[in-house]
Amino acid sequence: MPILTPDALDPVALLAEVAALGLGGTALFVGSVRRSAEDGPVAAIEYTAYDAMVDAEAGRILAESALRWPETRVALRHRVGRVEAGQASVVAVAASPHRAEAFAACRYVIEEVKKRLPVWKKEIYENGSAEWRANDGSRAAAATPAPRAP
Amino acid sequence: MPILTPDALDPVALLAEVAALGLGGTALFVGSVRRSAEDGPVAAIEYTAYDAMVDAEAGRILAESALRWPETRVALRHRVGRVEAGQASVVAVAASPHRAEAFAACRYVIEEVKKRLPVWKKEIYENGSAEWRANDGSRAAAATPAPRAP
Amino acid sequence: MHLPLDAPAPGGSLTVRCRLLAQYEEIVGQGEVTLELPRPSTVLDAVRFLRARVPNGSLLPERPLVAVNLAHALHATLLNDGDELALLPPIAGG
Amino acid sequence: MHLPLDAPAPGGSLTVRCRLLAQYEEIVGQGEVTLELPRPSTVLDAVRFLRARVPNGSLLPERPLVAVNLAHALHATLLNDGDELALLPPIAGG
């Protein structure tokens, strides 16, 4: 399955993707678009990705997880395009015979995604302005100013 | 919501229960009935609970989580009665502004549940025999022998 | 099943509802027993009293996991009249 | 946009496709540029070449995050003919 999708994320479908009868513990992480930011109420986030590299880098992250926790199955999905406040932007899941490993693998995947997956977000505020955001919360270059009143 | 239910667990309903616009990170754990055990293929688990104490003890566990991670919302659901192999027996969820706290609170709740929640399981094997099981995997007292062939 | 005091209690008596859960209910053949105990009695006193009197009582552990009034308790906990004591097999939820 | 060699290269040349992502695409006004570089050239050589020649190039960082052939790379990485270089703004997924 490709990692990126323009459609609503479905945690249950991702749980089913890793489910197996021997895997009694499954950890799942859902990241959602937050409403509040320093620059005012967020209406949505517009996600842009380096598509081909997302699949390659996610493949490396999932393979690293499989090396560390060989009995644990992991899966990942990330939105591209506009995601409204409150909606899920990323889901990672890990199913394991051991719950400690399910948590560890799920955590590993989401932490690496936040550091390495070539995806960028532009916060779109309720007043119509927009701004690129880094994951450390800092403003990134090339702000888009609010449209002027007509 | 009561913690115990005889019905199939619904992770999406539990995610919705803790969702809020300021909570960008949600961790969820699903425990499922494993098929394999030392005593042969498991067809199902029959869960028995001390009902009134389950609500009281779960209330304490969730309150402890709220004390440790005040910004994090948690919820828990556990099956009672017969649960078929592969089906979910427990779901814990934690939504937080910070993903580290979502993982920590979710983990705390499931670990405390495994230690403290007054619930017991009888593994039902495909040959029709059944056996009480402790969470450390040991056999508990009062085995139910396999029914004799007619 | 009601288990009465077996001797007059100079300090008075107290009545405790005792729940037997899961495999303990199967061992004894019932899930609830009422105990009449001399005052003061601890949880461990109640467990000893019960083990000596119920069917298959000796198959129950001498020091089981216990709860009083829906909370985990210690064997040394003093019981009060009207308390709900419970004998809990090793926890196995999740 | 194609940026040719600006002087004859005694060691020969190599052609690299350079992707500009997210805000870097907005800054430059295009998402892809082809660079013709003297051999050998590192990633950092390519970034310098690009910054000096594309519109608003000086607004790009001197030492941006980079990928070569869909994997994160170092500035010292040597480029090969046909490589896909990418300039990545600070990662902001999740």
Image (cartoon, coloured by chain):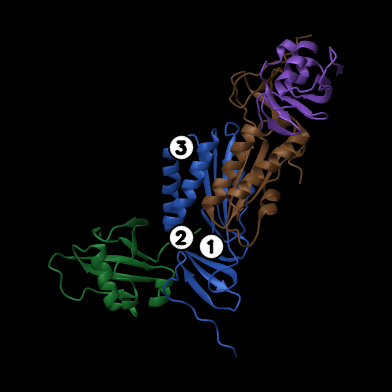
Chain colours: A brown, B blue, C green, D purple
Residue A60 drawn above or below residue D61: below
Chain that bears disc 3: B
> What residue sits 60% from the left and 32% below the top?
B21
Between marks 2 and 3, how big is the CA–CA gap?
A: 27 Å
| Residue that appears at 34% across and 80% down | C55
Q: Report which residue position mark 3 lands on.
A: B69
Q: Which mark is residue B80?
A: 1
What's under tag 3, amino acid-wise? Trp
Q: Residue furthest left?
A: C10
**Image depth: mark 2 or mark 1 in front:** 1
Residue C75 lies left or right of residue A5; in this view the side is left
Spatial separation of the CA atoms under disc 3 and disc 1: 29 Å
* Mark before the other along the chain sequence, 3 or 1: 3
User: Which residue in the protein does label 2 denote?
Assistant: B51
List x then y, in percent, for residue B38: 53, 71
Return the x and y of residue A84 as percentages of the image width and height. 70, 31
User: From the viewer's perspective, is the residue at label 2 or at label 3 nearer?
Assistant: 3
